[in-house]
Amino acid sequence: MIKVLACSIAMATASMVTAGAAYADESAFLKTLAGSWSGNGTVKVRTNAPTIKVTCRFKSDTNAASLALIGRCTSLMIFSRVISANLKASGDSYTGSYIGAGSGTAGLGGKRNGDAINLAIRWAKEVNGDRSAEMTIKKIGASGMRLTTVDTDPATGRSVVTSRIDLRRS
């Protein structure tokens, strides 16, 4: 009985240490995304719309368990939109909200895998025939970040990149 109890205590202690390490790793990762960012990319307002080239600027605030990203993307006089994502981390899992598709505040949920946070989007109302899409926030090297959204074309069922923005720390 004493061996079983000792084993249980050791396993519980190891679980707490592992959970603490995962939290510390997320804190270090989130810190790398903090700061001012600028860059270029492409946006499709709908999956069947033409691609629009955009220039974007973002400010990212982070702490040990959250990321707040807010910015604006513009394209000449055709397109200008405020974009924001607010995420909270619990281990390698993330939940939060996104504004940028013109459909209201969308819900986000997903996990980090390496240098990328992969998120499912739940739109506030239908976009491209449904209420779901995907977003990836990826750290690229020491001073780069890529924001990508992918949606399904209702006419073909194919995945379409609806935005891809490459940013550099500014």
Image (cartoon, rainbow, N blue to C red):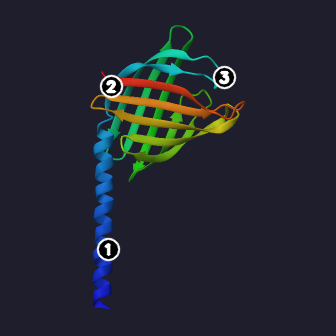
Q: Could you tell which of marks 2 and 3 lies nearer the N-terminus?
A: 2
Q: Are marks 1 and 3 in contact (CB under 8 Å)?
A: no
For mark 3, does the 10 Å Cα neighbourhood hold few (<14), some (14 to 19), or many (20 or more) residues? few
Coordinates of residue 68 in the picture (x, y in percent): 40, 36
Whole-Å distance between the Cαs marked 1 and 3? 53 Å
- Closest to the camera, between mark 1 and mark 3, is 3
Helix, strand or loop at mark 3: loop
Q: Residue furthest top?
A: 77
13 w.r.t. 69: above or below: below
Q: Amino acid at mark 1?
A: Met
Q: Is residue 105 left or right of residue 23?
A: right
For mark 2, does the 10 Å Cα neighbourhood hold few (<14), some (14 to 19), or many (20 or more) residues? some
Helix, strand or loop at mark 2: strand
Q: Could you tell which of marks 2 and 1 lies nearer the N-terminus?
A: 1
Q: Residue at x 35, y 35 (%)?
A: 139
Q: Identify residue for label 3.
A: 48
Q: Residue at x 36, y 44 (%)?
A: 114
Whole-Å distance between the Cαs marked 2 and 3? 32 Å
Q: Identify residue for label 2.
A: 36
Q: Quadrant of the N terminus?
A: bottom left
